[in-house]
Amino acid sequence: MTGLADLVGISSISPEPFTLQLQNIELSAQFFTHISVSFSIAFVLATPFILYQLWIFIRPALYPKEKRAVKGAFGWCSLLFFLGVLTGYFFVFPLTINFLGSYQVSEWVKNQISLQSYIHMFIWLVIIMGIVFEMPILLRVLSKLGVISKEILKKYRKHAAIILVILAAIITPSGDAFTLFVVALPLYILYEISILVSFSKQPAEDEKVPS
């Protein structure tokens, strides 16, 4: 984060340096931390294979139209998931830890952060950002299936913006308005990309004008 801030010349996105002293209060916590982190990394790296196996499993139950709509989405799902994970790792997680790790309701209350709490926050944020980045491809598939349309996404653009700001506040509960903005902005950009890649509503057969 600091390197990025120096590169673009915006110091606001660089968290203030602070010391975070992790503590272990359980005998087996460090051992199981290694296991949980290893499983999480394995899950992220295995995402393309998992999605491919999921496609093989559900393909026989789909109609031809549904197969065409879903088939091309799996490759993009993996790419967007990895982009979301990288965004969570290099961007969202440092901002969140900086805020939560230095926040105090009173100077008399000292933070004593456990190793498990830190790792759980890390895994949750990284995975949730990977899932959030699936929004464009998910909305594209739903629009191709006729569940939603480009017109609906445009109509509720303002509602979506409010929801995405709330989601950004949940992901990075920071009192800094700029931090909230730089997290909410990528989410809204994803929504706009979803509108661009989604399909318009197809007229019903009885609504079509005869040629």
Image (cartoon, rainbow, N blue to C red):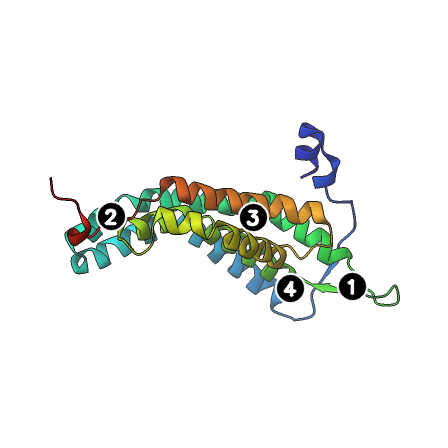
Q: Secondary structure at mark 1?
A: loop
Would you say the residues marked 1 and 4 are in contact, meaning their CB atoms lie under 8 Å apart?
no
Write the residue at 20% across / 52% down. Answer: 204
Residue corresponding to mark 4: 117
Which residue in the structure is indicated by mark 2? 202
- Residue identifier under label 1: 111
Relative to 68, residue 107 above or below = below
Give the structural element (helix, strand or loop) at label 2. Answer: loop
Q: CA distance from mark 2 to mark 4?
A: 49 Å
Q: Earlier in the sequence, mark 4 or mark 3?
A: 3
Instruction: Say whether disc 1 or disc 4 marks the residue closer to the N-terminus.
Output: 1
Q: Which residue is mark 3?
A: 88
Question: Is 28 in front, or is 7?
Answer: 7
Q: Earlier in the sequence, mark 1 or mark 2?
A: 1
Mark nearest the camera among 3 and 1 is 3
Q: Which residue is at the far left?
A: 211
Q: CA distance from mark 1 to mark 4?
A: 12 Å
Return the disc, 3 or 2, that comes first in the chain's sequence.
3
The residue carrying pointer 1 sits among few (fewer than 14), some (14 to 19) or many (20 or more) residues within 10 Å by Cα, namely some
